[in-house]
Amino acid sequence: MLSDVDVWRSAVALMKRYGANAGFEAAKRAEHLQESADLEGGANWVRILRAIERFRAERPDGSERLH
């Protein structure tokens, strides 16, 4: 199982590489590993997917003031 730090690092790396398609890529990898009976690997990719979703949900929309 990946550490939380590694999950976030992986999420950021996927977002840099795939942009808006990062979530799709993470979901695709999770599904492939789960179908291959690599449940731990699949679970790691689900965690990465959740991190991507959470990161994107917390980004300001431009109307929000940053400090």
Image (cartoon, grey):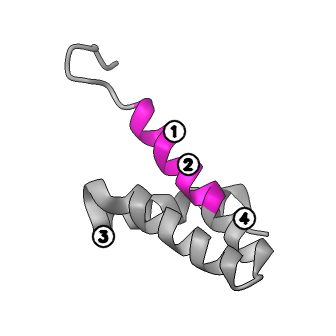
- The three-letter amino acid code for the residue at tag 3 is Arg
Q: Nearer the viewer, mark 4 or mark 3?
A: 4
Read off the residue under disc 1: 54
Q: Which mark is residue 27?
A: none
Please provide percent x and percent y for residue 27: 51, 63
Q: Amino acid at mark 4?
A: Ala
Secondary structure of the residue carrying numbered label 2 = helix
Local secondary structure at mark 1: helix
Q: Are marks 1 and 2 in contact (CB under 8 Å)?
A: yes
Which badge, 2 or 4, comes first in the chain's sequence?
4
Q: Earlier in the sequence, mark 4 or mark 3?
A: 3
Instruction: Count the marks.
Output: 4
- Whether the magenta-drawn stretch holds residue 63 is answered as no
Q: Is residue 52 visible?
A: yes
Query: Disc 3 to disc 2, how far (Cα)?
Result: 15 Å
For mark 3, what is the residue?
Answer: 17
Please give the range of residues in magenta: 46-58
Q: Residue at x 61, y 66 (%)?
A: 45
Q: Nearer the viewer, residue 36 or 42?
A: 36
Q: What is the secondary structure assignment of the residue under circle 3?
A: helix
In whole angstroms, how far apart are the C-alphas of marks 3 and 1?
A: 18 Å
Label 1 sits on what residue type?
Answer: Arg
Which residue position holds label 4? 43
Mark 1 to mark 2: distance in Å? Answer: 5 Å
As drawn, the label of residue 51 is 2
Which one is earlier in the sequence, the residue at label 3 or at label 2? 3
Location of residue 4 with respect to 2 vertically, above or below: above
